[in-house]
Amino acid sequence: MNKRFYERVHTSLDVKLICDKKVHSGVVTNISRNGMCINSNLPNPSEMKSCEVMIHWHKEVMKVPVKVLRVTRSDSSSEGMGVELIQSPKKYLEFVDTLHFFYSLA
């Protein structure tokens, strides 16, 4: 049984994370209408309450506020974070729907 309300799309999307007024790099490994899994080199992601994910799309930057739900260690130098959207901007939802459409054609 699938526990997720929205289907996730596997991707490797480079993003920037703003957490505690610092900018970090990350890679979104899967994305849905209400959350993402992000690999990053944040120093202590388990201590982060919320962050802002910056996604470049169509020559624009979407800033998506998220809260950290869980943290997993993928290897010695990176952490994976499961995040949930605090707010779902319309452009973000359009972006995810576009990804779903193109991945369904593959």
Image (cartoon, grey):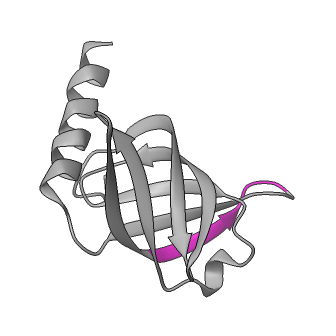
Which residues fall within the magenta stretch? 68-75
Eyeballing the image, is 106 above or below 77?
above
Q: Nearer the viewer, residue 80 or 87?
A: 87
x%, y% of residue 21?
A: 55, 80
Left or right of 84? Residue 88 is left
| 14 versus 89 height, above or below | above
The quarter in which the C terminus is drawn is top left
Residue 91 spot, x, y in % from top left: 17, 49
Point out residue 90 in the picture as x, y percentages from the top left corner.
12, 54
**Residue with the most extreme left position:** 90
Task: Confirm whether the magenta stretch covers residue 21.
Answer: no
Q: Residue at x 45, y 45 (%)?
A: 30
Residue ID at (87%, 58%): 76
Indicate the quadrant where residue 59 lies: top left
Q: Is 81 placed above or below 92 here?
A: below
74 inside magenta stretch: yes
Residue visible at 33% across and 63% down in the picture: 64
Q: Main secondary structure of the magenta part?
A: strand
- Report the number of discs: 0
Q: From the top left corner, tell me how far across and down residue 28 is, in percent.
A: 50, 47
On screen, residue 13 above or below 75: above
Snapshot quadrant of residue 38: bottom right
Q: Is residue 8 left or right of residue 105?
A: right
Of all residues, the one furthest to the front in this rendering is: 59
Residue, far top = 106
- Residue at (49%, 86%) from the top-left corner? 49
Instruction: Pick whichever, 65 or 56, lies toward us.
Output: 56
Pick out the residue farthest to the right. 76
